Image: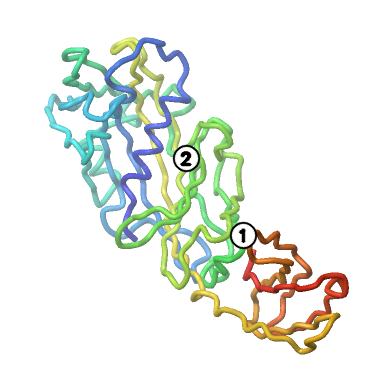
Amino acid sequence: MKRSLPLLLANLVLLAVFLPGRSAKAADALLYGVIKTQLYTQAVSAVSASPLPANGFVFDALVIPTTNYSITNAILGTPSSQQIPLHLVTNGTALIFQQAFSSQSAMDGTYPGPSAGTITYGMTMYAVHDGVPNGSASYAPSFFGASYPPVPEPNNLPAAQSIDNTRDCTFTWIINGSTSANDGVQFVIRDYSSNNVFFASPFPFTSNALNGLSDTVTVPYYSLPAGSNLVGDLTIVRVAGSPNTNAYPGATGAAALAINTSFPVATRPAAVPPVLRFTQKHAPFQVSYTGEANRIYHLLSATNLVNPAWTNLTNFSTSSGSYTDSNSLHNSRTFYRMQVGP
């Protein structure tokens, strides 16, 4: 499955909020750093996630400006003294460099750390107000072990292939290894071809965000498009070196390791509008409906259509049913409608 680059970059963007010791001084850059990611995929029928068969190891370097275009250019300095320019993305919201590899050894050979010891990457930034600040981000084996987080695996993927988008949907997962609240987690559902995001849990290390102890998330009703084949991403991010808040005051340099598991998600076709009819046309009115199986229906009523206050009379979970409205004996007129979900 295709990797969603913007989502993994967003994980790093928000590390700047989490990392301690940030200066109150406004800087043209919010965050700069590097991230090494291992990509996994889990098929519907699989009992566990598997490494992505091609280009499953990705190195990213990035700079996140405080405001759009406040950093106009940036150059990554590697431990081997390479000077690599970063690409300014549309709207000036980030500068990035990315390279994919077929193996971890190939990635580590080109971009070492943290297995090779303390490894430092430099970043030269060309700022609108701050001149040409130089920063650095380091991988350090002594920093919480500086190891990749374990692989997350979603549960019950067969059920995730027929999601009713008119109802809340809860996803759960297991993590095959040790994690803590210091690890960041994000759950995302996106379009396969365009990477358009339909649902994303709060960014790691922000208020109400998931962490390494989390194992469930609820996607609200109507968040996902009906009749669509989608991709879920479950990402764990781990800071792998002491953050640098001194080199460029006001900005944070960070080195991180991440694991991302992608998996298929599919939604049911759009709900067929239920047919509502009167089966008793005098008070008390009796109405009946026909719809679809495995949907939730709500019968609503109001006494006017100028400024209606719709009241839920009852709920149905079957494809057909009827209801006698005793309250209609006390109203001069009553209007009815059916709502599908949540």
For mark 1, give the secondary structure: loop
Q: Position of residue 322 (x, y in %)?
A: 77, 83
Residue 328 lies, with reference to residue 54, above or below; the image says below
Separation of marks 1 and 2 at Cα, in angstroms: 29 Å
Residue 155 lies, with reference to residue 242, above or below; the image says below
Quarter of the figure with residue 147: top left
Q: Which mark is residue 145?
A: none
Which one is nearer the viewer's eye here, 314 or 166?
Answer: 314
Q: Residue at x 51, y 32 (%)?
A: 206
Task: Please identify the quadrant where the C terminus is shown.
Answer: bottom right
Q: Which mark is residue 168?
A: 1
Quarter of the figure with residue 10: top left
Q: Position of residue 8 (x, y in %)?
A: 37, 42
Mark 1 residue crowding within 10 angstroms, few (<14) / some (14–19) / many (20+): some
Q: Position of residue 40 (x, y in %)?
A: 40, 54
Q: Position of residue 331 (x, y in %)?
A: 82, 70
Residue to which mark 2 is pinned: 149
Query: In the picture provided, is 80 more to the left or to the right than 292?
Result: left
Q: Residue at x 23, y 24 (%)?
A: 70
